[in-house]
Amino acid sequence: MTRPAPIVTDDNRDFWEGAREGRLIAQRCSDCGRLRHPPRPMCPHCHSLGYEPAELAGTGSIYSYTILHHPQHPAFSYPVIAVLVDLDEGVRVLSNLVGVAPDAVRIGTRVRVTFETTADDMAVPVFEQA
Amino acid sequence: MSASLGGAAAIVGIGQTEFSKAAGRSETQLASEAIVAALSDAGLTTDDVDGFVSYTIDPVEETELVRSLGPPLVRWSSRVPYGGGGSQGVLLHAAAAVAGGAANVVVAYRAIKARSGGRFGRAQVSPRATSAHSGTTSSQWCAPFGVLTPASWMSLNATRYMHTYGATSADFGRAVVQLREYAATNPNAHFYGKPITLDDHQSSRWIAEPSIRLFDCCQETDGAVALVITSIDRASDTPAPVVIAEAATAGLFEEEIASNHYRPNLEVMDGSVALAEQLFGRDLSRSDIDLAMIYDAFSPILLMQLEALGFCGPGEAKDFIADGNLAPHGKLPCNTNGGLIGEGYIHGLNLTVEAVRQLRGTAVNQLDDPRTALVTASRTGVILQR
């Protein structure tokens, strides 16, 4: 069973379409220029409705992590390593760490983005050790 | 909270069903049973009730409740978002309603079949992007990564907390041992008669490593609780009123419930810091608190709230607990029913019921003459007094 497809909405479409093309995207406000994630329709700082997809370098460091053992869902292989990554551009994303043994996960480790396919020919950004 | 609300309302009745793993009846029935019990406790009837408040995610619709309870006229109703983190918000809503004259007698209720019905802890992928008003973006931003349960969401914060302050799983375990000790003498608790040792805690299996073991998790529970709230004037005619001295909510920018991953410093529960500023900003201080009931869906957030609420410094909750301060004769007796971990999980509102019992002097683990109780759930809280 493959990883479930993300749920695409009017507000998050840029992020998931970017992921399908192998690009990590944050919203950038067209007016004040601030980056934001998770996506939303209005800039909370200047109330602009204008935004564009900004491609990020995909590099950052692990802010926190958890190694998930139970309960288990058939679409994932366990243990699942979940991470919060502080990206170098200043936004944080929740994702998975891949290619690293569970007992080797550390806060502060440098990581870079890669992508894994999901159901419905979509993709999610995940991270590997840089 | 504005000065006009403080002390304007009181809890005059409490009621509940049994707590179990399989109630065998509908949430509407569970709510109805708890509400009738609470009204009886208050010396009131459904004819007196003209307001209802619950959680946005409670499954019992007001129209269904009214069909069973039969109140002649409902003048006001409300729902509070944020899941269990909003649990104490029902008292702010109820107090505001009676203080403002929108209602005379409000029933606050929560009915749940968290074990035999929809389990929070099941690994499931929601077909919807949003959360049915529980205050989380988890279904769209966590589910694609296998982060599917409240334990998995909160463990990310708890791991950061451990990293920053050097807290360990055993530190969380010492809190759990205390909660299970309270539960062991509470016949209403799931873990009645089942205390544990720290070794038992440390050998329970990992749910989310390195922060949450099985025994760090609350008990998914079936049941219902209800509270009756009315004005301070009318409360004086009831048998055992408890005054809502303070009630507050503090929802901060970028702070989510459970999937709270986007505030800068996740080792601090900022919402609880802001909540405490409101609760203790007027007439009452932390030294007035004789008893605290603190939302313990998972043990790490008990430590984190003790710090955020200002009962100990950052990173010091582990020492505060190791010194025995949550015990009956400690500095801050806490979750004396066993908490959500030891008694059961009626989504936080059973903590409020226990606070009322303690202030009335009718709790099973009765403290020595408590007069002021704090009840908090992340971003919502109340101070109750007799």
Image (tube, helix red, strand yellow):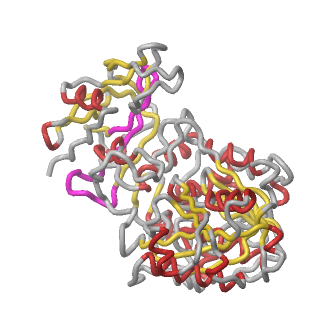
Q: Range of the magenta residues?
A: A69-95
The outermost residue toward the front is: B72
Q: Where is residue B148 in the image (x, y as percent from the top left)?
A: 34, 53
Residue A42 falls in which quadrant of the image?
A: top left
Q: Position of residue B114 (x, y in %)?
A: 42, 70
**Left or right, residue B25 beside residue B268:** left
Task: Give whichever of B302, B215 is nearer the camera.
Answer: B302
Task: Give whichever of B69, B84 is nearer the camera.
Answer: B69
Residue drawn where x is 38% and y is 38% of the image: A94
Residue A130 falls in which quadrant of the image?
A: top left
Q: Position of residue A29 (x, y in %)?
A: 43, 18
Task: Give whichever of A39, B124 is nearer the camera.
Answer: A39
Instruction: Inspect this view and state whether residue B357 appears.
Output: yes
Residue drawn where x is 35% and y is 45% of the image: B142
Q: Is residue A73 magenta?
A: yes
Residue drawn where x is 59% and y is 83% of the image: B36
Residue B193 falls in which quadrant of the image?
A: bottom right
Q: In this view, does A108 lie above or below B307?
A: above
Quarter of the image for the C terminus of chain B: give it.
bottom right
Task: Give whichever of B347, B248 is nearer the camera.
Answer: B248
Residue drawn where x is 49% and y is 36% of the image: B262
Q: Position of residue A71 (x, y in %)?
A: 32, 61
